[in-house]
Amino acid sequence: MTLRKLFKKIKIKKVLKFGFIVFCVNFFIFCLAFYRNDSQRFMPDEYKLVQKIFNKISLNNDLGDRPISISIRAGDYMHWKLKNLGLGLCENEKNYCAYYVNLNPFRRFMGFRAADVNNAIKQSYLFGTVGAGANPAGFIAIDRSTFRVLEGNEAFIASIIAHEMNHILNFSDFKASLETLKIRLKDKNKSEKELQDIFFDEFHLREIEADLKGALMIYNAGYPKDTFYKAIDFVYKQAGIIHAESQAKNHPDYIKRLKLIKEFIDDESFKKDNIENHSAPLTWEYNRNGNWLKFYPNK
């Protein structure tokens, strides 16, 4: 064998070896990325805490028979921050800036005005307050600042979650709207303004219902009896200003709300029950790219 042929043979082997190594490295990176996207081991700490709380609540509560998705979002402060930047974002008085409020706070935004939006996400975490919302289709959104404000207080975070969970279980929006519809059909002379006022009154009743059932859910889960009351009290205190009439649009005012919760937990009928049709163990799924955590009750 000539030296030239030997050299070519060695060179081909090196190329094949190098190509195999590159393939293996890329395959490993692909598998790691795929695993990391779905792995609960690599979830942000906020999601791990939510999972822990729901697992605890499910041990002695009925969470229904539907899958429930939870997403931790940039937060409500995004609306006000972007509105005040003078960028033309979120400045429409009639529309809530839902797109930016619901951005994923765990990854960098790459769209329009990326630097400003990413800075707003950071400030929303630092300056935001406790915030969460529920969709009757089975979705709970929690502002990331909630975990900063309530850091180290699992019981209070559990109370916020229990309130939103009961909105889902009770179909709060639908019930309030149904009662309003009945009134509209009964009295066709009602104006849209009157019907809207009736709807908000009905929704206040659903907020009270979510509070009372949330308080019992938390107690059944093993938290102290007055946990929910203290949590709601603190939520108002950390918000600061509570006297504005607009703040009582979606919830009863602070005094009325705390009074009703206190009367409920002090009543002799407020007792911890052993729930036979509890939802544990929950089955969990996580998606990093989608920014959601989902559980399926054991039914």
Image (cartoon, rainbow, N blue to C red):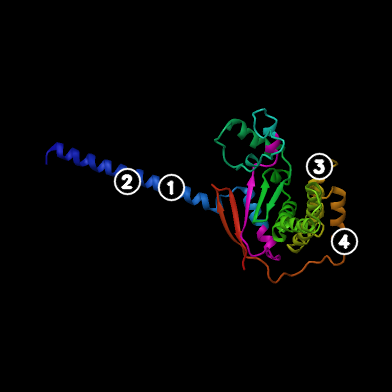
Q: Which residue is mark 1?
A: 30
Q: Which residue is mark 4?
A: 266
Q: Is residue 292 left or right of residue 8?
A: right
Q: Residues within 10 Å of mark 2 (few under 14, many from 20)?
A: few
Q: Is residue 200 left or right of residue 49?
A: right
- Where the N terminus falls, by quadrant? top left
Q: Residues within 10 Å of mark 4 (few under 14, many from 20)?
A: few
Residue located 60% across and 53% down the image: 293
Outermost residue toward the bottom? 276
Mark number, residue 20 = 2
Vertical comparison of 288 with 100: above or below: below
The verdict on residue 94 being magenta is: no
Residue located 69% across and 58% down the image: 168
Spot occupied by residue 207 in the image (x, y as percentages of width and height): 78, 54
Vertical comparison of 226 with 92: above or below: below
Between disc 4 and disc 2, whose residue precedes?
2
* Kind of residue at badge 1: Phe
Task: Name the image quarter holding residue 215.
Answer: bottom right
Disc 2/disc 3 C-alpha distance (Å) = 65 Å
Disc 4/disc 1 C-alpha distance (Å) = 56 Å
Spot occupied by residue 152 in the image (x, y as percentages of width and height): 72, 48
Between disc 3 and disc 4, whose residue precedes?
3
Disc 3/disc 4 C-alpha distance (Å) = 30 Å
Q: Are marks 3 and 4 in contact (CB under 8 Å)?
A: no
The verdict on residue 71 being magenta is: yes
